[in-house]
């Protein structure tokens, strides 16, 4: 495994280099074959915009990442990048990739990724169905949360996952997971789903909110189909 790593950013039009993730520090090997999720509050990477400064909170997110990436990869290895190594001491996960993430490959713009991967929509829905099949609610699904490896979409960022066995939460407690730009669009969706951000919200409803907010990054029809997969329980 290549041990020479550098910071990994997304080059967003009109914004320039932006953090690939708000929580951990994103690293990529110089040969672009290994991605590293480093659960460390690195000032150099986050540039004073650090979302998580409490080491206990960072450790909590690290523990969830390890738990759920292992849980999903054991059941659906085709939907997760190969785990090359987990460095528990330094809180690093090393994943096998094949170049930049899907968002970067798309030029960090648009909602249709057919020019990157012709059947991306079906592949994405297959991944979402697999999460539903094993009882996982996954709210981190920005296009930068997917890599394309050998023509297959692979999902990352499992720190933002829950199951019905988890203690229920409020939306207010999740703001460190959500970009400031996306937060600005939340209130109308809160209203439409009858969500009070300061009250306990069922996970399935947070999942519905997730699909609705990501209509900014994916085709509306794709997100509507995803909603049907996670339809409200009777």
Image (cartoon, helix red, strand yellow):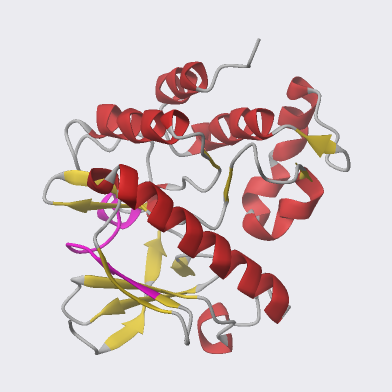
The image quarter in which residue 56 lies: bottom right
Left/right placement of residue 141 relative to residue 199 reads left
Q: Residue at x 48, y 79 (%)?
A: 91
- State which region is magenta: 93-106
**Residue 56 appears in view:** yes
Judging depth in this view, the residue of 130 and 14 nearest the camera is: 130
Could you tell me residue 167's position as x and y percent? 74, 46
Q: Which of the pair 163/107 is nearer the observer?
A: 163
Query: Residue 37's quadrant in the figure?
Result: bottom left
**Image spot of residue 202 (x, y percent):** 73, 32
Q: Residue at x 67, y 35 (%)?
A: 203
Q: Residue furthest top?
A: 234
Q: Is residue 108 above or below residue 124?
A: below
Residue 149 as seen in the image, left or right of residue 157: left
Residue plotted at (27% across, 38% down): 113
Residue at the spot 51% in from the left edge and 34% down from the top edge:
135
* Total number of numbered discs in the rendering: 0
**Figure quadrant of the C terminus:** top right
Q: Quadrant of residue 207?
A: top right
Quadrant into which the N terminus falls: bottom left
- Tell me if 90 is positioned left or right of 205 in this view: left
Check the image and report above or below for 137 versus 179. above
Pick the front one: 186 or 24: 24
Q: Position of residue 137 (x, y in %)?
A: 55, 38
Q: Is residue 53 visible?
A: no
Q: Is residue 105 magenta?
A: yes
Expressed as whole percent of the image width and height from the top left, the position of residue 145 reads 40, 53
Q: Is residue 155 magenta?
A: no
């Amino acid at each position: 495994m290549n041990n020479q790593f550098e910071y990994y950013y997304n080059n967003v039009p009109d914004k320039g280099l932006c953090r690939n993730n708000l929580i951990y520090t994103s690293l990529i090997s110089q040969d672009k074959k290994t991605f590293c999720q480093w659960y460390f509050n690195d000032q150099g990477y986050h540039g004073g915009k650090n979302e998580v400064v409490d080491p206990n909170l960072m450790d909590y997110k690290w523990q969830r990442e390890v738990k759920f990436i292992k849980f999903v990869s054991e059941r659906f290895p085709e939907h997760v990048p190969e785990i090359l190594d987990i460095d528990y001491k330094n809180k690093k996960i090393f994943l096998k990739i094949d170049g930049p993430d899907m968002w970067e490959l798309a030029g960090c713009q648009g909602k249709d990724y057919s020019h990157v991967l012709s059947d991306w929509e079906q592949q994405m829905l297959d991944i979402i169905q697999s999460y539903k099949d094993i009882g996982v609610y996954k709210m981190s699904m920005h296009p930068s949360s997917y890599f394309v490896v050998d023509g297959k979409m692979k999902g990352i960022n499992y720190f933002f996952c829950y199951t019905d066995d988890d203690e229920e939460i409020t939306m207010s407690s999740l703001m460190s997971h959500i970009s400031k730009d996306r937060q600005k669009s939340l209130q109308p969706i809160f209203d439409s789903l009858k969500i009070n951000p300061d009250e306990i919200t069922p996970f399935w409803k947070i999942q519905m909110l997730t699909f609705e907010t990501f209509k900014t990054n994916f085709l509306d029809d794709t997100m509507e189909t995803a909603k049907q997969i996670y339809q409200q329980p009777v």
